[in-house]
Amino acid sequence: MIYNLVLFIHIAGVLLLFAGLAIEWICILKISNAITGEQIKEAVLLYSKLLIAGIGAAMTLLSGIYMAATVWEGTSWVISGLVGFFLIALTGGLFTERKMKRAKKMIKNADENLAGFFGNANRLLLSIQLRTTILFGVVCLMTVKPGSLSCAIILLASVAIGLVPFKKAKALTSKA
């Protein structure tokens, strides 16, 4: 009974993570398509109120650790899932979180050069694409429960897929 409850919390956490990523996609697309600083400001302020992904991450991680410790200890897909989770956090922290915190400070200080600060949003788009595809890869790992080699292939494929649309978008925008 406890395991099933923890599994529910785990799945609910993943759903919250996806919901948070969906809202973040909206924010980043608004920034990348913004014409005025006010449009960027709205997107940054919406992003700064985004707590759902953090709550989902905590639920997913804590319940996952419990299940790994009690039932699935040492399996390659659990370890690979943790690696994927770490990659998601690292990518978000390096590419998105820092930039958005600095933008929020600029808004607080009434700095109107937000459009210049963001320039093009390619790094933000790369970050959200990578995190989305890696999260799908982690869900694949948790569902299929493959062996070690397949785990590595799934994680590498999820990263590669996350990079492909970014490169196409960059090539299309450079021609325009």
Image: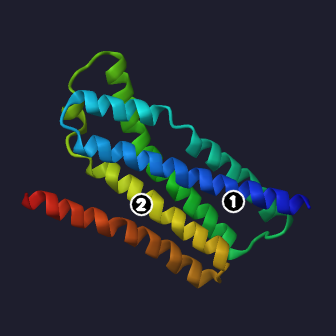
Q: CA distance from mark 1 to mark 2?
A: 21 Å
Q: Which quadrant of the structure image shows residue 81?
A: bottom right
Check disc 1 and report its element: helix, strand or loop: helix
Q: Is residue 125 above or below residue 41?
A: below
Q: Which quadrant of the structure image shows residue 43?
A: top left
Residue 21 appears left or right of 138: left
In x, y percent, where is residue 113? 20, 26
Q: Quadrant of the C terminus?
A: bottom left
Q: Residue at left 40%, top 54%?
A: 128
- The answer to whether residue 66 is seen in the rendering is yes
Q: Is residue 119 above or below residue 109?
A: below
Q: Which residue is mark 2?
A: 130
Query: What amino acid does circle 1 point to?
Result: Ile
Q: Residue at left 76%, top 58%?
A: 8
Of residues 136 and 96, the one nearer the viewer is 136
Q: Mark 1, residues whose alpha carbon is within 10 Å: few (<14), some, or many (≥20)?
A: some
**Disc assigned to residue 63:** none
Q: Which quadrant of the structure image shows residue 142?
A: bottom right
Q: Is residue 62 above or below residue 69?
A: above
In x, y percent, where is residue 117? 23, 33
Q: Residue furthest top?
A: 109
Q: Residue at left 86%, top 64%?
A: 70
Count of marks overlaid on the render: 2
Q: Which residue is mark 1?
A: 11
In x, y percent, where is residue 174? 11, 58
Q: Quadrant of the N terminus?
A: bottom right
Q: Residue at left 58%, top 78%?
A: 151
- The answer to whether residue 95 is seen in the rendering is no
Query: What amino acid does circle 2 point to?
Result: Leu
